[in-house]
């Protein structure tokens, strides 16, 4: 595996990740560049909604084409400084194909994301977070409760993976994949949250609402009152309703978020 993975000692002076304007765009396909822009936008949106954990979590996206490469953040950049050009291209064996910053990647990012991209060709984007609410619910024995509309969206569609330690061991990949199964969202117990989307937009959408569901649960339990829990048939109805919302396929929310980024700070496109 490339020795730049988990390169914690990489210099973080500006010169260490200076990228010549236009250099990355000139050497990748138009399709890859579009994915790079979309993935950088996802990082910026996640930062905006406080889903970050300094430099230690990750979002990845599959590169279009037959080579089975994926893009992930350079290790050492905060999510609000990710750009289309700074993303690192990696293959499914963890070998770095193109690293414009020279910073390498987080090994745990490869272990988790590489496993999902290898096993699930239907997944274009994997998002993993360590938010306070996500970690709190991941530590609760009952898991996510159907106490909010946001939570009921995941009724019957949420996987769980037991904690095995920091995700550095390659043999954990098979259990991550086994536990995720065909689902698009998973709680990593005592760890955090994971979503796997057919598109970058879908992965973000799932993570945003899963995070909101966890926040609502933590707040409701903190209130100390007896919880009102809807019936399983109602929860199943809500999940089916969300699965068939026609505007989701049009990426209505994602387009609005991209427009907001373009108004506030379009540097993610660089």
Image: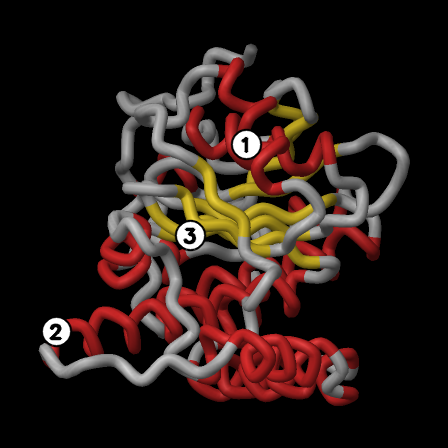
Left/right placement of residue 250 relative to residue 180 reads right
- x, y percent for residue 210: 45, 67
> Which residue is under mark 2?
222
The answer to which of marks 2 and 3 sits earlier in the sequence is 3
> Which residue is under mark 3?
193
Q: Are marks 1 and 2 in contact (CB under 8 Å)?
A: no
Q: Are marks 1 and 3 in contact (CB under 8 Å)?
A: no
The picture quadrant where one finds residue 116 is: top right
Taking the spot 55% from the left edge, 26% from the top edge, the residue there is 175
Give the CA distance from mark 2 to mark 3: 21 Å
Seen in the picture, residue 51 relative to 260 is either above or below; the reply is above
Q: Nearer the viewer, mark 1 or mark 2?
A: 2
Q: Residue furthest right?
A: 66
Residue 145 or residue 33, whichever sits in front: 145
> Which residue is under mark 1?
176
The picture quadrant where one finds residue 242 is: bottom right
């Amino acid at each position: 595996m490339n020795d730049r993975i988990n390169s914690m000692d990489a210099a973080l002076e500006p010169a260490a990740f200076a990228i010549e304007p236009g250099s990355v765009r000139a050497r990748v396909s138009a399709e890859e560049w579009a994915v790079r822009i979309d993935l950088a936008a996802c990082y910026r949106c996640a930062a905006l909604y406080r889903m970050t954990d300094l430099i230690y979590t990750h979002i990845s996206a599959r590169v279009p084409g037959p080579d089975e490469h994926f893009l992930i953040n350079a290790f050492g950049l905060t999510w609000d400084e990710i750009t289309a050009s700074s993303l690192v291209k990696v293959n499914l064996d963890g070998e770095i194909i193109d690293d414009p910053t020279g910073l390498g990647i987080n090994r745990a990012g490869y272990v988790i994301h590489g496993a999902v991209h290898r096993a699930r060709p239907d997944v274009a984007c994997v998002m993993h977070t360590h938010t306070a609410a996500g970690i709190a619910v991941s530590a609760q024995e009952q898991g996510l409760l159907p106490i909010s509309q946001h939570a009921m969206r995941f009724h019957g569609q949420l996987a769980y993976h037991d904690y095995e330690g920091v995700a550095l061991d390659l043999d954990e990949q098979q259990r991550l994949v086994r536990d995720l199964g065909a689902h698009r969202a998973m709680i990593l117990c005592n760890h955090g949250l994971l979503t796997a989307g057919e598109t970058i937009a879908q992965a973000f959408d799932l993570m945003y609402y899963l995070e909101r569901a966890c926040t609502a649960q933590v707040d409701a339990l903190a209130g100390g009152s007896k919880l009102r829990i809807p019936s399983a048939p109602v929860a199943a109805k809500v999940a089916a309703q969300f699965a068939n919302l026609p505007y989701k396929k049009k990426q209505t929310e994602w387009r609005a978020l991209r427009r907001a980024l373009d108004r506030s700070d379009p540097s993610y496109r660089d």
